Amino acid sequence: LASPLQTLSAATTAITALGNGSTLRLKCGSTWRETLNLSSLSGITVSAYSTGAAPIVAGCDVITGWTQDGTLTNLWYKDVSHDSTGNNRQVVIDDDALMNRVADTATANTTPGAYYSANCSTANPIRVYINPNGTNPNSNGHVYEVTKRTNAIFLGANATLTGIVAKGACSNNGPIET
């Protein structure tokens, strides 16, 4: 290719055209908030190139615009759409650290650093509640990410994945599916 592709969707189209046994290289220091789906190909290699932090394929998005709950005053919520089904659960990440998932909103309200959401089969979008330690999540300087995709990476048979970080997906199996 004459120049690097900017999206994983474009990279998937290009690598699929090349076929089984091809190599896809992702630039260090980059983050993609979309799914890399190479499940139809076998023998694919996905690896990092350049210097810096490992490339990240994220099943989560940064969420802003939280609303304070009118009754449970330590909670803030946001309705978040997702592509997951079944008993998968969303995960909330606060500045690259997983928040503590609790069983209900009442517990989340009394547990700083906790979050609550029902399983993904109940609704889409789903309401996600966070307890940001008595602060306003819209102005406390933290970055909150919520999982929106079932997986970050889908790979076909005999695939090799080297030097890539996959994070923040709804699947109970984790962010990488083979």
Image: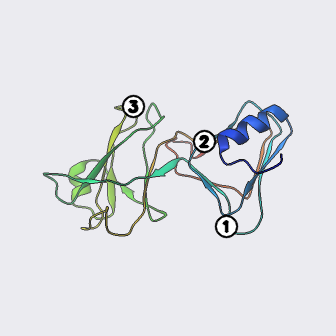
Helix, strand, or loop for circle 1?
A: loop
Label 1 to label 3, Cα distance in Å? 35 Å
The label shown at residue 121 is 3
Q: Please give left or right for residue 6 compared with residue 77 in the image.
A: right
Q: Amino acid at mark 2?
A: Thr
The residue that appears at 13% across and 51% down in the rendered structure is: 71
Closer to the camera, 86 or 138? 138
Quadrant of res 95: bottom left
The label shown at residue 43 is none
- Location of mark 2 (residue): 35
For the residues carrying marks 1 and 3, which lies nearer the camera in this image?
Answer: 1
Earlier sequence position, callout 1 versus callout 2: 2
Q: Please give left or right for residue 120 compared with residue 17 in the image.
A: left
Location of residue 153 in the rendering, given as x and y in whole percent from the top left corner: 64, 43
- Location of mark 1 (residue): 53
Residue 133 to residue 56: above or below: below
Label 2 to label 3, Cα distance in Å? 20 Å
Q: Is residue 156 in view from this perspective?
A: no
The residue that appears at 54% across and 47% down in the rendered structure is: 59
How busy is the neighbourhood of tag 2: few (under 14 within 10 Å), some, or many (20 plus)?
Answer: many
The residue that appears at 24% across and 67% down in the rendered structure is: 134
